[in-house]
Amino acid sequence: MIVLSDADVAALLPMRDAIEVVAGAMKEVSAGNANLPLRSIVDVGRPNMMGVMPGAFMPGSEATAPCYGIKLVSLFPGNPDAGYSSHQGAIVLFESQHGSAIAMMNAGLLTAIRTAAASAVATRALAREDAGVLAIIGAGEQAEHHLEAMVAVRPVREVRIVGRRREKAERFAAHAREMHPALKIDVLDDVRAAVDGADLVCTVTSSAEPLLSGDWIAPGTHLNVVGASIPSKREIDEEMVARAALYVDYRPSTFAQAGEVIGAIESGRIGKDHVRAEIGEVLGGSKPGRAGPEEITLYRSLGIAAQDLACAMHCLTRARAEGRGVEAPL
């Protein structure tokens, strides 16, 4: 077994590579080439929890080897205040010929990268080509990776940041200015002001109550709603869900775990057919993307094990080629 550290994952999975890996994985998922049981949540003392995400990835392309595995990830919302990532855990990969465990790697950074990469895949497929004003709601680890992801796929020139705590948002903005000196980057205190006239909006919080109203969003905007991963949390209101052309990563998890979508269905604002497509269907050409420059598009991301498995296999393949990682025979 090869064990890969956080530093290994950072070196082996740059954002531009991750975007292509996730795009391929999403096409395979929508083609039916993955077995993805729903994420299980284990209460380990509120607000902390552990997510268990098993999956089998059986790509139709010979470019990626079939594999199966599991991600075990702890979500501790208070960790950033102590200098730790909010996501801690490990991914274990198994090969499909004999069922042997072949790799284990840090799940925190890989999760952060693949989540932002998935938003980039959706943005590349759905956002207007000229989208240049980006609003990021949230100032944690995902905000940093989402900025990198959005810059990779659209000509971003202006960034507006809103965080729950002003000082944390200012720290993120200062770091972002160092990494992206060509961008105009501002910190705002009001979500409505931040999204006013924005072309791209990324919500990357763990809010239990909607932070963003559909009434605030201008025609032509693309949104990536990312942060809330359990039904009790929701970052946007029902008006936003109903008003937008809605795209998802995987329908079964959307209807079971996306609180905003579940709430809008239960209230009668939308039906399940309001989901226009999985993003993999758009990438594969079987379902349409943006209908015109004035349409509002919304990608509701939950994250699925196929993304983790595909990124983990990419890391393992590169690690073997480059001699990275530690061999740990079982």
Image: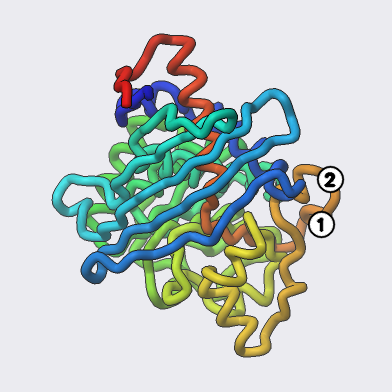
- Please indicate whether residue 148 sits to the left or right of residue 268 in the image: left
User: In the rendered image, which residue does mark 2 sit on?
Assistant: 285
User: Looking at the picture, how far across and down is residue 58, in whole percent?
Assistant: 66, 38
Q: Residue at x 54, y 74 (%)?
A: 260
Q: Amino acid at mark 1?
A: Gly
Q: Is residue 155 above or below residue 330?
A: below
Q: Residue at x 43, y 67 (%)?
A: 191
Q: Which mark's residue is nearer the viewer, 2 or 1?
A: 2
On residue 292, which mark appears? 1
Which quadrant of the structure image shows residue 241?
bottom right
Q: Amino acid at mark 2?
A: Gly
In this view of the protein, can residue 151 be seen by the observer? yes
User: Looking at the picture, how far across and down is residue 259, in whole percent?
Assistant: 51, 74
Q: Is residue 178 above or below residue 327?
A: below
* Nearest the eye: 81 or 39: 39
- The reply to whether the C-beta atoms of the residues labelled 2 and 1 are less than 8 Å apart is no
Q: Residue at x 54, y 30 (%)?
A: 98
Q: Is residue 157 above or below residue 86?
A: above
Looking at the rendered structure, the number of numbered marks drawn on it comes to: 2
* SS at circle 1: loop
Which residue is most to the top? 322
User: Looking at the picture, how far across and down is residue 235, in whole percent?
Assistant: 46, 69
In this view of the protein, can residue 203 be seen by the observer? no
